Image (cartoon, helix red, strand yellow):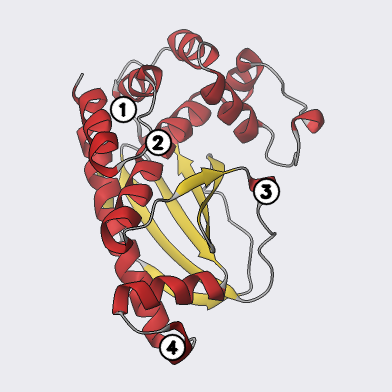
Amino acid sequence: MKETVQYKDLATRYGFTAPPECVARLTQLVAQSDLELEKVARIIASDKELRARLLRVANPKADDPSEYVIDTVEAALMRHGVACAVLIAMGTPLSIALVRTVQTMLSMKLEQADRRSVPVLEGEHLLARVGFAGKATGQVYLRMDMDSATLIASAILGIPEAELTHGPEVNDAVGELLNIMTGNFKSNLCDAGLDCRLQTPDVRTSEDLETPMVAGGGVERMVFRSGRIVMHVDLTVNPWNVN
């Protein structure tokens, strides 16, 4: 399977854990024109992490599994159908793109974290956003506090943190990171059979923490960290362009 080999090769090269075989199988199914939810359900139910991700997506208002209203794979797919499957499948190439980009550009090992284990993002922060369209349409939102953004800018520009001020320099540096990440994301999607077109990334400071879901879609929320750097990533996808 092309995507399985690619994911494993990337994992070996950049030192992160390769996704399990079932993730590649799920991505292959989503890329097909005759998506069968029964097959999707079997793949997701067979993997603990995929099942956990699906239930988080199916219960967007819950902060803890104890608050889940939908608590089975079958119920989640019956309620949300193909939307959840596409969202989960696209989240993996996005995660790989982000980890790979940070490793390449900053020589930092970025790891996915439990959202409950990191400080809540509040107030003014850096928001980077990029839209995509193709077999599915959606938006990627990358948020980080200004300290994390300054650390990233310092590493990219080779300028000590103390000499950087929050402004165009920091925004431009994070924008460069986002450009490389989205390029990797697009490459990963295309390799998985999910061709797409990317919009021009938008990077700015913001106090708005809401992620508007694309009409007819869902959202997966992820958190990544490397030392003092914490990145909050939201992926929202409308699957109905899958054909």
Q: What separation in Å lies between label 4 and label 2 (alpha carbons)? A: 33 Å
The structure residue drawn at horizontal position 54% and vertical position 25%, both measured from the top left corner, is 49
The structure residue drawn at horizontal position 41% and vertical position 70%, both measured from the top left corner, is 152
Circle 1 sits on which residue?
Answer: 243
Looking at the rendered image, the quarter that the N terminus falls into is top left
Q: Earlier in the sequence, mark 4 or mark 1?
A: 4
Q: Are marks 4 and 1 in contact (CB under 8 Å)?
A: no
Q: Earlier in the sequence, mark 1 or mark 3?
A: 3
Total labels drawn:
4
Circle 4 sits on which residue?
Answer: 164
Give the percent coordinates (x, y) of residue 180: 26, 59
Quick check: 177 left or right of 122? left
Q: Is residue 61 visible?
A: yes
Quick check: 240 left or right of 15? right
User: Disc 2 residue type?
Assistant: Thr
Q: Is residue 192 visible?
A: no
The structure residue drawn at horizontal position 45% and vertical position 87%, both measured from the top left corner, is 167
Query: Closer to the observer: label 1 or label 3?
Result: 3
| Disc 1 element | loop
Q: What separation in Å lies between label 1 and label 3 (alpha carbons)? A: 39 Å
Q: Earlier in the sequence, mark 3 or mark 2?
A: 2
- Residue 92, numbered circle: 2
The structure residue drawn at horizontal position 70% and vertical position 46%, both measured from the top left corner, is 116
Q: What separation in Å lies between label 2 and label 1 (alpha carbons)? A: 20 Å
Give the percent coordinates (x, y) of residue 170: 41, 80
Q: Are marks 3 and 2 in contact (CB under 8 Å)?
A: no
Circle 3 sits on which residue?
Answer: 117
Looking at the rendered image, the quarter that the C terminus falls into is top left
Q: Earlier in the sequence, mark 2 or mark 1?
A: 2
Q: Based on the displayed image, in which of its 4 quarters is residue 173 positioned?
A: bottom left
Q: What separation in Å lies between label 4 and label 1 (alpha carbons)? A: 47 Å
Classed neighbour count for the residue bearing mark 1: other residues with Cα under 10 Å, few (<14), some (14–19), many (≥20): few
